[in-house]
Image (cartoon, rainbow, N blue to C red):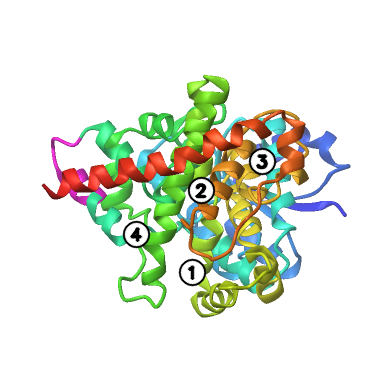
């Protein structure tokens, strides 16, 4: 079935130009063109659309307000700003309601890639209530302690970019949002960004300060939440997997850029669990309780209770936000790497191994082992490396203990 797209712009000449530029896509997209926000809302009331691609600057109701309405009324619609808008204040307003921000003139290949990626992962989540909750998310909640640490640092005139990057690199919610912004035309950069260090550097400390203190682009868990006690272990596990995945990549490839990509993938790999704890705390609490001492995998229990796994949920959001496919694959297949059909070492390889080894050592939210995929590792010629990688878990824990002891003294 063709995907139905709605393009919105108040300029008739722009719409005519889009219609001509997209003429060759008629075999893949069922495209409709609305001359303004109100016309777009009327179209949405009458028909179902898979994505809305709108200009930012329009009279009466601009693109940000339009997408805000669509987010509330039709949450599963992919929401994209396509604009030459350069005014910083207007651009910042579009961050919360838009899944992605692309620049004019429209690059058809890039638009096609982004939409196909978003649609492919969306189809994995068959539970309508959960899919709608994810599509409405403006951010993944952060740990209150890390959120407060960032706000204190940003209020200081002496804060450095390196200090800000180190804080963000310990938090799944902040990291995912920064990567979302770095992979949009929001900062005017072409190409995909999969390194947190690069993402923070491109966005810059002043914009991070504005996003955090004025726009409030990040959010945090309620300290009194029923799931609050589960959160530190999940964060610790994610940082452990990120650090060990990075170490594995350095040893295996010597490629520092790939190693930074592996760190980001490891940090994000359990983003779906955070979403479930935030959006469905009661239901997911039952899943985690049932997982204790159970021979069945956490994924099997999640799918039975919720209709999808945490890996699918995380990949869905990362795809909607336009993160690089290497990160999406690492999130989606970190328990089942053979299903990704990859023939070489990748962030998925490093994250799968780091995650399985960390869980086997007892460093995880859920009980039970997630087995290493022996066939996958054999196909890459990596089976004999596992014993050496297992030691990295203990080394990470030792380094964390030493850091905590230093901080206390």
Q: Earlier in the sequence, mark 4 or mark 2?
A: 4
Compared to residue 65, the image places residue 159 above or below, namely above
Q: Earlier in the sequence, mark 3 or mark 1?
A: 3
Which residue is tagged 4?
A: 143
Mark 3 vs mark 1, foreground winner is 1
Marks 3 and 1 close (CB-CB < 8 Å): no
Which residue is tagged 1?
A: 277
Which residue is tagged 2?
A: 268
| Any part of residue 91 in sight | no
Q: Around disc 2, counting alpha carbons within 10 Å, would you say few (fewer than 14), some (14 to 19), or many (20 or more)?
A: many
Question: Bounds of the magenta span?
Answer: 150-159
Q: Around disc 3, counting alpha carbons within 10 Å, would you say few (fewer than 14), some (14 to 19), or many (20 or more)?
A: many
Residue lying at 46% horizontally and 50% vertically, measured from the top left: 238
The local secondary structure at tag 3 comes to: helix
Q: CA distance from mark 4 to mark 1?
A: 12 Å
Q: Image quadrant of residue 18?
A: top right
Q: CA distance from mark 4 to mark 2?
A: 14 Å
Residue 262 falls inside the magenta stretch: no
Q: Residue 255 at what x, y percent from top left?
A: 52, 20
Q: Earlier in the sequence, mark 2 or mark 1?
A: 2
User: Is 409 positioned to the left or the right of 151 in the image?
Assistant: left
Q: CA distance from mark 2 to mark 3?
A: 19 Å
Q: Residue 52 at what x, y percent from top left?
A: 65, 53
Marks 4 and 3 close (CB-CB < 8 Å): no
Marks 4 and 1 close (CB-CB < 8 Å): no
Q: Earlier in the sequence, mark 4 or mark 1?
A: 4
Q: CA distance from mark 4 to mark 3?
A: 30 Å
Which residue is tagged 3?
A: 114
User: Is 193 positioned to the left or the right of 115 in the image?
Assistant: left
Q: CA distance from mark 2 to mark 1?
A: 15 Å
The local secondary structure at tag 4 comes to: loop
Q: CA distance from mark 3 to mark 1?
A: 28 Å
């Amino acid at each position: 079935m063709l995907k139905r797209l709605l393009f919105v712009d108040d300029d008739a000449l722009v719409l005519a130009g889009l219609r001509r530029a997209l003429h060759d896509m008629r075999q893949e997209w069922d495209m409709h063109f609305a001359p303004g926000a109100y016309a777009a809302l009327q179209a949405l009331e009458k028909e179902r659309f898979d994505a809305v691609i709108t200009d930012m600057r329009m009279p009466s109701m601009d693109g940000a307000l339009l997408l805000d309405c669509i987010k509330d009324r039709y949450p599963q619609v992919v929401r994209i700003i396509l604009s030459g808008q350069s005014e910083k204040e207007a651009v910042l307003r579009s961050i919360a309601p838009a899944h992605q921000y692309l620049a004019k003139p429209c690059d058809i290949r890039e638009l096609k890639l982004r939409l196909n990626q978003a649609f492919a992962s969306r189809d994995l989540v068959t539970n309508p209530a959960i899919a709608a909750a994810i599509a409405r998310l403006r951010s993944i909640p952060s740990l209150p302690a890390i959120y407060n640490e960032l706000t204190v640092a940003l209020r200081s005139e002496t804060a450095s970019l390196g200090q800000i990057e180190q804080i963000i690199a310990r938090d799944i919610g902040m990291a995912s949002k920064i990567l979302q912004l770095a992979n949009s035309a929001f900062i005017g950069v072409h190409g995909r960004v999969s390194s947190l260090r690069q993402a923070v550097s491109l966005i810059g400390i002043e914009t991070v300060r504005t996003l955090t203190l004025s726009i409030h682009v990040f959010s945090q868990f309620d300290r009194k939440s029923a799931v609050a006690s589960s959160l530190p272990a999940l964060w610790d596990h994610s940082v452990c997997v990120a650090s060990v995945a990075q170490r594995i990549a350095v040893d295996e490839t010597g490629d520092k850029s790939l190693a930074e990509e592996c760190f980001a993938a490891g940090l994000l790999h359990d983003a779906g669990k955070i979403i479930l704890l935030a959006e469905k705390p009661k239901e997911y609490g039952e899943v985690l309780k049932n997982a204790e001492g159970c021979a069945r995998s956490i994924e099997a229990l999640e799918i039975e209770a919720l209709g999808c796994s945490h890996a699918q949920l995380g990949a869905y959001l990362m795809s909607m936000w336009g993160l690089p496919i290497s990160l999406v694959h690492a999130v989606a297949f970190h328990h089942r790497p053979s299903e990704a059909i990859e023939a070489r070492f990748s962030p998925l390889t490093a994250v799968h191994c780091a995650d399985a080894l960390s869980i086997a050592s007892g460093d995880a939210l859920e009980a039970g082992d997630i087995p290493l995929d022996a066939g996958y590792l054999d196909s890459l010629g990596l089976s004999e490396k596992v014993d050496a990688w297992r030691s990295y878990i203990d080394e990470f824990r030792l380094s964390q203990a030493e850091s905590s002891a230093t901080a206390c003294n």
